Amino acid sequence: MYLILVYDVNVKRVAKVLKTARKYLHWVQNSVLEGELTEAGFRKLKADLSRVIDLREDSVLFYVLGDWRYTRRELMGVKKGGEEWIW
């Protein structure tokens, strides 16, 4: 599956969330990561993040797409992030 992760967490946890998510996905922009994951990898990512975030204060959104071939991404403005979109 292709996954887009967007997070809004307390500043105290931003670095930990980013470090955890980068084990699974590619950072593309502030608070946004994306990449291909298996169902098992997705479960592991969610478990790892649940140990880092505060569920009463933080928010993590997962956009689960069936396959990257059926997605389209357009950039407007400044490119951020260290990775290109993986084809």
Image (cartoon, rainbow, N blue to C red):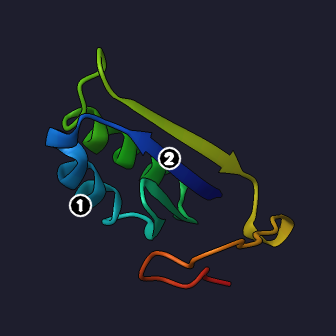
Query: What residue is pinned by disc 2?
Result: 6
The residue drawn where x is 60% and y is 82% is: 86
Compare residues 71 and 58 and report the one nearer the observer.
58
Q: Residue furthest left?
A: 12
The residue drawn where x is 53% and y is 61% is: 37
For residue 52, the mark is: none
Task: Name the side, left or right, on which 60 lies relative to 63.
Answer: left
Query: What residue is pinned by disc 1?
Result: 19
Q: Secondary structure at mark 2?
A: strand
Which mark is first along the chain, 2 or 1?
Answer: 2
Figure quadrant of the N terminus: bottom right
Crowd rating for badge 1 (residues with CA inside 10 Å; few <14, some 14–19, many 20+): few
- What's under tag 1, amino acid-wise? Lys
Q: Position of residue 76 (x, y in %)?
A: 72, 71
Q: Residue furthest right?
A: 70
Among the 4 quarters of the image, the one containing residue 20: bottom left
Figure quadrant of the C terminus: bottom right
Task: Name the side, left or right, on which 47 lies relative to 51.
Answer: right
Q: Position of residue 65 (x, y in %)?
A: 72, 52
Q: Position of residue 13 (x, y in %)?
A: 18, 42
Among the 4 quarters of the image, the one containing residue 66: bottom right
